[in-house]
Amino acid sequence: MSRQPPEDPEYRAYRASGERPGRRGGATHAARRGRASRPQVDAFLDDPDDRPSPGREPEPSYRVYRSAPRGVGARLRGESESELGRRIEAAERAGGAGRARSASGRGRDRVRRRGAATVLGSPRGLARWGLRTWTVWRALKYLAVLAVAWVALSAVLFVISAQNKAGNIPPALAKALTPVSAPMLVSAQNVLVLGLDNRPTTGYSSHEPGSNYNEAVANTDTIMLWHVGGGVSRRLSIPRDTLVAIPGLGEAKINAAWSQSPALTVKIVEGLTGVKINHVIIVDLGNFPQFINDIGGVTVTTPRICSTISGGVKNGGYSLFLKPGSHHLTGTEALTLARTRDNSCNLAYNDINREKMQQVILNGIKSQLFSAPAFFHLPWAAWDAPGVVQTDMGASTLLQLFVSSELGGAYTPQTLNETNGVYNGQDVLIPSAADIRAKVHQLLDG
């Protein structure tokens, strides 16, 4: 009977390249370092002093190692363990004795590492399947990469939305602005923020009794100067009842300038403060609550508030009742607070208090943007944010505005301090020239 060739073993045999037990130096040491020829090694092995003593098994001139598992690439190529072994041996023969020993050493190192990785209970057991070991630092690295990708996705959505959702301002208003060429990130610019009292056709306040849906004849409920960019972010509110001279109307409340001409509003604010306006933002009340909800609401500290707008909830309007202290408000509640000028719990509450609460809400939005709920909903907030405004600024400048507002640091918002008065039978607020100079200096110079 002819003998069948044995199956490929699960191990490979390597000639020992290390030192023989009990001996150092000599021909074996030289052979290990690649300076001894094969005859020298054979002569050394035939040395009578090194022959095994009677009754003792001769020590083999090779070592046995279990072959390492095939990698994923080798499995996909269909290579068997024996084929891999033959490839290694061919490489060793072609590379010479020195490189063969180096390859053999690296192979043994891989075997040792894989063997350690398969120890029962070791977290490195996944390595036998070609999977990477998960450590705390590696997990943190991947989380950081995901966070950066999440922010980048949000920025892309913001830019796309700004190109499609941000409304355009009237052409005459755009011409009234003072253009600036420097980027906002490196140069502070003046932005006029306006909130009109006209109502949207859908969403918040769209069904209030007596609503005005025509922007052209609206009044400005909110007027705010924002000095932002170049590492600063400061705001100054101008009460809507401030008494000023308006061409075509004479002495009147500043909020009436818009219905005469949107561009006239810019000129009136510039004449009152001496500040040149570079950009304008008109807040859209209909989309503002959705943006607040996207970032998870807003936390504010308020006095006692008892507010009913347009007859309250029972009559199709809005109601808001708050105790003194800190409150986390939804988008609808935040906008109702921003509109409150008559507080039945505090009859001294007036338009100046309302302007201050609007500043508190803006600060709350800024703080909320760094919260966990806002981060997880960042793409949705980025998509909805441009729909809250009409502006002359493009997507790039709007993004710079957002970044600059965060880089500007903490700042206590200011409001013009004015005196109560009556003009033509209307309650008005009379500005002080000295107060305006002081507040504008603080706005521009800190």
Image (cartoon, grey):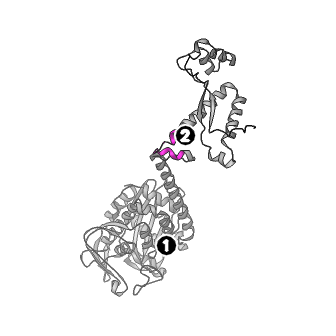
| Residue visible at 51% across and 45% down in the picture | 125
Tell me the residue that label 1 is attached to.
263
Q: Rate crowding at label 2 as few (under 14), some (14 to 19) or many (20 or more) other CA atoms within 10 Å.
A: some
- Find residue 114 and name its label: 2
State which tag comes first along the sequence, 1 or 2: 2
Give whichever of 441, 216 is nearer the camera.
216
Residue 423 against residue 441 in the figure, above or below: below
**Tag of residue 423:** none
Marks 1 and 2 sit apart, C-alpha to C-alpha, by: 75 Å
Residue 123 sits inside the magenta stretch: yes
Q: Is residue 343 magenta?
A: no
Give the secondary structure at mark 1. Answer: helix
Amino acid of disc 2: Arg
Residue type pointed to by label 1: Ala
> Residue 344: x percent and y percent?
25, 79
Nearer the observer, 166 or 392 = 166
Q: Position of residue 83 (x, y in %)?
A: 69, 40
- Name the spot of residue 302 as percent of width and height, x first: 28, 69
Position of the C terminus, as image quadrant, is bottom left
Question: Counting other residues with Cα less than 10 Å from the Cα at mark 1, is it few (<14), some (14-19), or many (20 or more)?
Answer: some
Q: Is residue 337 visible?
A: yes
**Magenta stretch in the rendered image:** 115-127
Q: Quadrant of residue 38?
A: top right
Describe residue 136's horizontal placement relative to residue 80 as left or right. left
- Report the residue that reaches farthest toward the top: 48
